[in-house]
Image (cartoon, coloured by chain):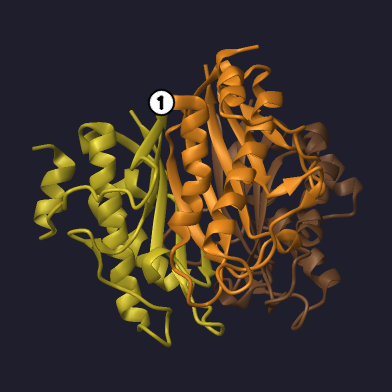
Chain colours: A yellow, B orange, C brown
Amino acid sequence: MGRVEETIKELGLELPEAPKPMGSYLPWAKSGKLVFISGQLPRKEGKIVYQGRVPTEISLELGKQAAAICALNAVSVLKDAAGELDKVKQIVRLTCWVASSPFFFDQPQIANGASDLLVKIFGEAGKHSRMTTGVIGLPGNATVAVDLVVALR
Amino acid sequence: MGRVEETIKELGLELPEAPKPMGSYLPWAKSGKLVFISGQLPRKEGKIVYQGRVPTEISLELGKQAAAICALNAVSVLKDAAGELDKVKQIVRLTCWVASSPFFFDQPQIANGASDLLVKIFGEAGKHSRMTTGVIGLPGNATVAVDLVVALR
Amino acid sequence: MGRVEETIKELGLELPEAPKPMGSYLPWAKSGKLVFISGQLPRKEGKIVYQGRVPTEISLELGKQAAAICALNAVSVLKDAAGELDKVKQIVRLTCWVASSPFFFDQPQIANGASDLLVKIFGEAGKHSRMTTGVIGLPGNATVAVDLVVALR
């Protein structure tokens, strides 16, 4: 077991099986050292477990948890892409999409649920640039989606 | 005529002229082997032919067709960028933006209209990672927009 | 002072201090020659100075100004990332996110506020591919956000 996977275990987390795509696409694609991870939803065993818009249909706190699950799913996909998580050199971009009620503007707090987890798991290599937006709705009424661009060693 | 263009012909499709940008930007930009294709709308001969939000203003089926037109326009731009479509090594990222009514959550079905066409045209090289989102509105009231990141040989 | 910074001065503009991130992320991250600049908001001295949706809560003209401020902030971050703005080879991707009322579809005009400024500042190197979308809301109720992917020499 690699160093990053040991960290995941120490955090009390378990890497899920990489989620299957929800359409005609791949979980990831690579060009040179760059891996593009498809948009990940807060799914557990294939089922979306956090649905609805923040904060009228689901709370900010649950939205943050949802973002962390998206990030963990992204790490699973990344393991498949890289072969071994210790090969991750840097997460270069995280985009966080938050299903938002019309007067919700605290999307960065939700996104922190994903960002903080990646830093816990990868340390310096997990620090990333980020774009966060509110959106009117996401596939399957998911509360959050997260996609990544990652540089491998 | 290259292999990919022959496939396009065999599919009964015709590659349109690459759409002109709708603002102060380029249809594509390159860095090394990576080409970034600007957001493509469902335009034919310059005119947006699918407008409105799915499913209240336009049907899911028409939305899917709109996504395919976006993808075909993207392929035209890609031809200009690559010189020759056979130089496409891999479509690494497709982002699909769907103008959505508040309770529409089937955006992946719309996005499949674009994804499936790219796989028909490019085969293995057309398989890609993907992010799909609903949005409140797109330029010109377009139903869908598609942008790409593509690796060239 | 480099050539690009002289141009900025000649345009009567002043490069602000690079804005601090609004969450657990970095202002930029690099992979090889590619720099990913985090989403920039229309902030001055840390405060978001253009808020609300176009055109019901803020005018199209102010939205365009807001986009230009986002772009200028992105240039500040880019200076930190590149060390020196003359090292910018090409801005390869600009994504413009416009907080939009349900019947606003002129997002490209807003985005031009950002695009035009980058071309004034960098000349040919400032020309870029672009994706523009309307969104229901942005962090801090900002009117616009802009993020970039930039190739360095």
Residue at point 41% right, 47% down? A148
Q: Which residue is mark 1?
A: B124
- Categorize mark 1 by other alpha carbons within 10 Å: few (<14), some (14-19), many (20+): few
Give the left or right position of residue A15, taking residue B116 as reference: left
Q: Is residue A14 above or below residue C149?
A: below
On the image, the x and y values in percent for residue B79 come to 67, 25
Check disc 1 and give the amino acid type: Glu
Residue at point 63% right, 37% down? B72
Give the left or right position of residue B103, taking residue C149 as reference: left
Residue at point 58% right, 58% down? B63
On the image, the x and y values in percent for residue C119 come to 82, 42
For the residue labelled by badge 1, is the local secondary structure a helix, a strand or a loop? helix
The residue lying toward the viewer, choosing from C74 and C102, is: C102
On the image, the x and y values in percent for residue A51 come to 34, 75
Is residue B53 visible in the rendered image? The answer is yes
Q: Residue furthest bottom?
A: A56
The residue lying toward the viewer, choosing from C119 and B21, is: B21
On the image, the x and y values in percent for residue A150 come to 39, 40
Q: Is residue A65 above or below residue C72?
A: below
Q: Is residue C22 above or below residue A119?
A: below
